[in-house]
Image (cartoon, grey):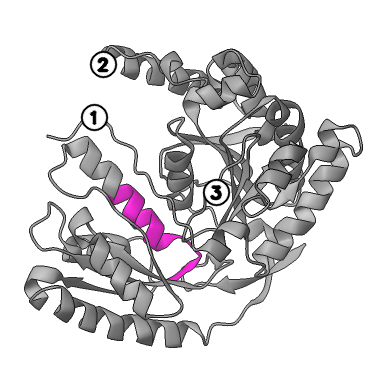
Amino acid sequence: MNFMGYKRPDGTVGIRNHVLILPTCACASETCRVVASQVNGSINVINNSGCAEVKGNEEMTQKILIGFAANPNVYGVVVIGLGCENVSHQKLRESIQKVTNKPIVSYGIQEAGGTIRTIEKAVRSARQMVSDASLVKREPCDISSLMMGIECGGSDATSGFGANPAVGNLSDRLVDLGASTMISETIEFVGAEHILARRGATKEIHDQIIKICRDYEAHLAAAGQDCRHGQPTPGNKDGGLSTIEEKSLGCIYKGGTRPIVEVVMEGERPTKKGAIVMDSPGYDIASVTAMVAGGCQVVVFTTGRGTPTGHAIAPVLKVTANRATFQNMIDNMDIDVSGVTEGEISIEDAGAAMLDELLEVCNGKTTKAEAFGFSDIAIDRICRFI
């Protein structure tokens, strides 16, 4: 099975052809936003970190920024820094060049002489990149080049017995075709991790799944915190979920049934193809951020309560099995599988229909969040700022 994608010099395949305006730190985010607003074909992301960070947070920020730049949906990158942050624009540019050979330039606001001069330089570079990117045409690419992130947020009871199993079926279909799928949100495995771990292709992977759940709870406990304070959320409870175990049992359905071939750390790129687990937080925006940094070209996002979430780099398809939510949030929701909940269609039929829709998005169809220009970014924090 093929889709029409953009082949990159580093061997990856994109389903979008963006020029990314990337800030090294929060102080450069607004300048990046202005640059992107001046150049059609470019996008920006907001970085609310990047300076005065403890080492663990700094490493996480850099991992995410480098991953964004290396994502196959990005043709080229314009990095903008302030000049006094921990990791300069030159250093970030060099780090990106170690993992991908796509076009990249960088500028410093202090070096250039302020915002206006920086914008002038960056806009010229971005316009040239967009012009060059326009010469790259879509061509047939095997589905094995695709990695789909799987997320859930604003879950209710219909998520666990409708949307998540349907997306799980989609995941199985993709894996069987040679593609990769990725689930995350470690804290939302808690209470059902033993069931998820049974899918490990090896005993080592089984044990890794158990370990990341234990480690996450231990990390919180060391700071005197308990994940059950925020899980389930008030919206989850209003939607019929009463315990973290109940939420987790529904959550793991969306990853399908195929053997899990690899467990990767937050924001890291997998080395194998197939069903993958990423160790990430339970906050859906942070997990989407990490999976896009890990190379996912598209994200399928299940929700019972509804969400407007999107990402600048990768299209996010919102799926619900709650008909009232789909009708009430029609401007945000992409796929309605409420027929599963109401016994009108099977999980298999829903999975097949979603595969067709996914291929259309891979071929260029715009998602609801893309039409809005939404870009939700949250970089996970290891601990508080200095």
Query: What is the spatial separation of the Cα atoms under label 3 and label 2, in whole angstroms?
Result: 32 Å
Q: Nearer the viewer, residue 98 or 32?
A: 32
Query: What is the spatial separation of the Cα atoms under label 2 and label 1, in whole angstroms?
Result: 9 Å
Quadrant of the image for the C terminus? top left
Query: What is the spatial separation of the Cα atoms under label 3 and label 1, in whole angstroms?
Result: 28 Å
Find residue 58 and report its horizontal and vertical position in percent.
21, 43
Q: Quickly name the residue at label 2.
A: 223
Find residue 200 and report its horizontal and vertical position in percent.
61, 27
Q: Quickly name the residue at label 1.
A: 383
Which residue type carries mark 2?
Ala
Asked if the stretch drawn in magenta spans residue 74, the answer is: yes
Mark 3 and mark 1 residues within 8 Å of each other at the beta carbon? no
Tell me the residue at 57%/33% (across/down): 154
Find residue 260 and report its horizontal and vertical position in percent.
62, 33
Which residue type carries mark 1?
Cys
State the extent of the magenta-drawn residues as a range.
62-75
Which residue type carries mark 3?
Pro
The vertical placement of 56 against 145, above or below, is above
